[in-house]
Image (cartoon, grey):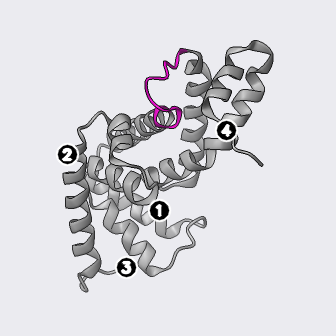
Amino acid sequence: MKQVEDSEILEMFAVEKTRNEAFNLLLKKYQQKIYWHIRRLVLNHDDCDDLLQEVFVKVWKNLDKFRSDSQLYTWIYRIATNESITFLNKQKQKNNTPFDEVSSELADNLVASSYFNGDKLELKLQKAILTLPEKQRIIFNMKYFDDMKYEEISEVLGTSVGALKASFHIAAKKIEAFITNDEIDY
């Protein structure tokens, strides 16, 4: 099946008669990528599903205002990233816990999750990623898992390419140190 271009989706969305069809095409094209982006940030499947729904509700409500000064998927990624960060901040405030403890709780939830089917090394990688500061974690996930270019990440996060490269490099070094440390229990 041929992948529909973003411009076609936007043209169809602008017409009331084809709006629902356009949105369904957009969902087919981006839902899975956005799901995994959110999932790597919040780790919990149910939370991710809720956030995914919120993201696409926002996309639906605001797609007619999309200015095409960025790519459609980077715009959707920005919404998903912001929603995920807001969710994680609410979790911290709700539990009145520092980010490190929230990361530890996320790691425990990952181990207990019936949706996680990775091996021990993958679990250790996820735990290593959770030790990163929030922004480094987001940058690492977008570059490593989503294979986004620095320019695209820059559009999503509003950060310079140079700063992103430095953050990714530091994050990769921290993860490498975590994984190669034999004393870490996983």
Q: Earlier in the sequence, mark 4 or mark 2?
A: 4
Residue 11 in percent (x, y) is at: 67, 20
Task: Report if residue 131 lies within the magenta region.
Answer: no
Label 4: element kind: helix
Look at the picture and state if 122 lies above or below 99.
below
Q: Earlier in the sequence, mark 3 or mark 4?
A: 4
Reading the image, the residue beneath label 3 is: 186
Local packing at callout 4 (Cα closer than 10 Å; few below 14, some 14-19, many 20+) is some
Residue type at tag 1:
Asn
Which mark is nearer the camera, 4 or 2?
2
Could you give the CA–CA distance between mark 2 and mark 1, rounded to whole angstroms? Answer: 34 Å
Residue at the far right: name it: 17
Local packing at callout 2 (Cα closer than 10 Å; few below 14, some 14-19, many 20+) is few
Residue 33 in percent (x, y) is at: 56, 49
Could you give the CA–CA distance between mark 4 and mark 2, rounded to whole angstroms? Answer: 32 Å
Q: Earlier in the sequence, mark 2 or mark 1?
A: 1
Task: Report if residue 73 lies within the magenta region.
Answer: yes
| Residue at (53% x, 53% y) in the render | 36
Label 2: element kind: helix
Residue at the far bottom: name it: 182
| Residue at (57% x, 54% y) in the render | 45
Q: Earlier in the sequence, mark 3 or mark 1?
A: 1
